Image: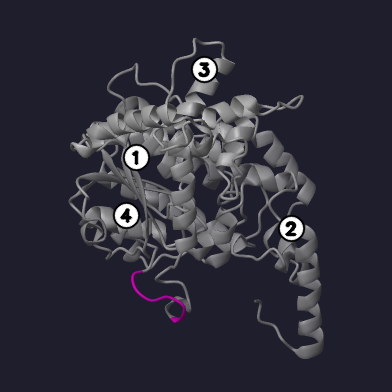
Amino acid sequence: MIPSSVGLVELRQRIDEVTRFLAATVGIANAHTVEFYTHDVWSSFVAVSPEEVLTAIETSGRQGEPQLQQQSGSTEQRGTTFGFCPDTKRLVDAHELLRAAKAHSLPGMGVCMSRDELVESLRRDPSELGVELEADEFMNSKKSHEVQSMAEVVDCLAKRCGVKQVVDVGSGKGYLSSFLSLQHGLRVFGIDSSSANTHGAQERNRKLKKFSKVYQKHRKAAKGEPERQVVTDIKSEEEEDESLKDKPETPDSNPIEEFFFSLMSLEVIQSGRTFSSSLTDEERQRRKRENLERKAPSRNGATGAVFSPLTSYVTAETQLRELIQELEDAVLVGLHTCGDLAPSMLRMFAARPELLAVCSVGCCYNKLSEEFEPDAHDCSCGPFGFPLSQHLRRRSWFCGRNARMSACLALERVTLGHGIQMESLFYRAVLHVILRDHYGAYKSV
């Protein structure tokens, strides 16, 4: 989100600064990792040693974020352009390049606010903090962090817009959709192109909904809080809670975590269940009566939070109201929107009046189609993903596939030797050399 103090003219100036920086550096960004072996790319683009570059990266990590205003114009005084020699086009100052890269990042340009600042600006009631269900009980730590962080933003957007519906595009296995539905009380329509994902999301959500109250009871018991009577809303399966109590605990185990990990698996085996055949007639009638009483409000028109998985391939032209008949005003969301799905969501948001807000986290930038990339028209049909900006389209701007691939890599992981499979890339380089020297094949694949 762009702060209201940044106008359109200033925003275009910042974009021009970024394109100027990329024009000087995109050459090395578009070099494939294999080409460092086969074409000696390092010597072609860099005039300093790898050790010096790594030292510069380590040093820059301990420094503050430079601002774009402080960076502009300083490189010319040193006789370099963002650390590159203007004559040889080779990198001669790694420290200067890193300072320029930070200055031209979103935080350095000052055109965006942080996620925490966004949530604070959207939250009307300071007491609206946290949720009962802790996602890390049934997701790995990375997924848990992503889901909880994005769910809070989406919930704040929904409250600010006064809506109770969310459309989750590319919902996958339904982690975010289920979390929004169960813990934030939102009606979520999850759309995914894979029927297998849709079925899996439906099963997981069904089990989560069935056991959500049981989970809260166990969580409070683990914290030593007073235990309240909890009755689930599933016919003849109310004793799921009792089966958990009867299950023997092993040393160093977390019963709540084990319970929810098994719950999220489609192959969950529910052992120790008290079957209806073992209950007395009086007990069966009592439970049936309680189920009917709890279901009565929903039959009288109360909607409540629901997650509805759908299978459909979504493009910018998708008519959501034809796909979702119950759709009202809603928030459009997408976590890990791959390739062109992210720009398709933005186009959809701009064209559909029923979508009052959008929250998208893109990924797989290497799969993003670029209108002005050479040979792009041979492999893409329909609207291109980049650029969306008319300002950049007038300049026919493109980055290139390898540069987009580099954008998927975290610098912190790469410097520690993670994120790039160096051994497999080395053998790929050997194959390239054999094809080049013995078969005359020079095209990189």
The reply to whether the magenta stretch includes residue 379 is yes
Q: Is residue 382 above or below residue 239?
A: below
Residue 270: x %, y % from top left: 59, 41
- Residue 150 appears anywhere in the view: no
User: Which residue occupies 47% across, 53% down?
Assistant: 172
Which residue is identified by label 3? 220
Task: Identify the mark at residue 1; answer none if there is no mark.
Answer: 1
- Mark 4 to mark 3 CA distance (whole Å): 41 Å
> Which of the two residues, 45 or 445, is positioned nearer the viewer here?
445
Q: Check the picture and name the quadrant holding the C terminus.
A: bottom right
Residue 435: x %, y % from top left: 77, 83
Q: Is residue 431 above or below residue 26?
A: below
Q: Amino acid at mark 2?
A: Gln
Q: Amino acid at mark 1?
A: Met
- Furthest toward the bottom, the residue is 439
User: Which residue occupies 34% across, 39% down?
Assistant: 1
- Mark 1 to mark 4 CA distance (whole Å): 13 Å
Task: Identify the mark at residue 211; answer none if there is no mark.
Answer: none
Residue 330: x %, y % from top left: 25, 44
Which residue is identified by label 2? 421
